[in-house]
Amino acid sequence: MGEDLSSFLPLSPAILHIMLALAGEDRHGYGIMQEVARQSEGQYRVGPGTLYDNLQKLMNHGLVEEAYRRSHDEDPRRRYYRLAPLGRKVLTAEVSRLEEVVRAAKAHLRVPSPRRA
Amino acid sequence: MVRFLYLCLLGLHPPAFRDQFGGEMLWIFDQTEAGRDVLALFSDGGASLVRQWLLRSGAWKMATGGVVSLVVIGGMLSGAAIQPAARRGEVRVAPHCPAPCEPADFRGQWAGNFHWPGPSGQMMLTFTNTGDTWNGELVVQGGDGVAHRGAAEDLRFDRGSVSFRVQTAHGPMRFYGWVAQGKLTGALEPADGVSF
């Protein structure tokens, strides 16, 4: 039986960008912030407060988990996060939903305006 | 100096959040080049402080609970009688929800009394919204004084009405509630065979 992911959707912009940043590889908080800025070409930025508030929510819902990936020379305050399997499914569902939105938007924008008789 | 101020800002966050993420937030602050984005970091930190205390820490729940308790005690002291519900299984809970009652207005605790075949008692509904997800909990305290808790499953809001499924000692039940004159009134019915 498939999981019901609809309760997670739609994702807020901050959540969507954070999950997208984690989709490729595990990242620490600062890395997530940089990746979000890079993906949006600097148009969308998350601060640490917004980032960790959303990370807390994502971890509470099992969408993101901490990745234990530390080396001895790293700052102990730096922690890595990864997209959990459920998070990947939710992100995939959100991308599909957004594709439908874009498809519908394009279809509506193509509708010609009525001509006058 | 600026770092010290940011440290103070982090120190004002709720302990649970501060312990979990404070070190990382300070590390990010240290990574930020001196003078660059510092204002944005303080702005974000201030917003985070308000958000964590008002929305995440549960402090507002305690405040709401305190106000509701005072109102109930005040009502009892003034001799106000609690009107029994009109029919069996009916639930009547307060406090206010302004009209038109939007889904977001359900957030918080709704405390009141219930009337059920058998002994009546106190009940409390808690609806929380964590960004995109609604969660609910039903706590019923019957005549035996024992608090029975149940998670509200399949929670649905439609403007002034709410419904959810909850497991009870009598099997799965569904609560249907609606807001009228600022009060949430509803009924628990067996979930099986009920369409909504």
Image: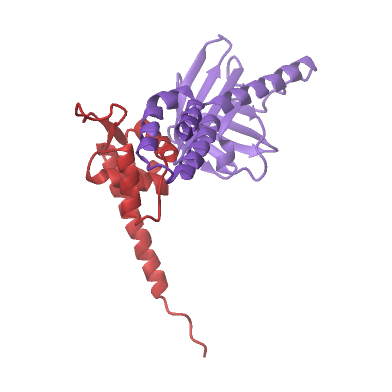
Chain colours: A red, B purple
x and y, in percent, of residue B136 in the image: 48, 30
Would you say A32 lies left or right of B85 here?
left
**Residue occupying image coordinates x 40% and y 52%:** A44
**Residue occupying image coordinates x 72% and y 23%:** B83
Among the 4 quarters of the image, the one containing residue A83: top left
Would you say B6 lies left or right of A16 here?
right
Q: Nearer the viewer, residue A94 or A39?
A: A39
Among the 4 quarters of the image, the one containing residue A27: top left
In this figure, what is the number of numbered marks? 0
Q: Residue furthest bottom?
A: A117
**Residue occupying image coordinates x 62% and y 26%:** B64
x and y, in percent, of residue A62 in the image: 32, 33
Q: Nearer the viewer, residue B81 or A92?
A: A92
Among the 4 quarters of the image, the one containing residue B86: top right
Placement of B46 over or under B76, stated as above or below = below
Would you say B149 lies left or right of B116 here?
left
Q: Nearer the viewer, residue B191 or A79?
A: A79
Residue A10 visible to the viewer: no
x and y, in percent, of residue B155 in the image: 47, 36
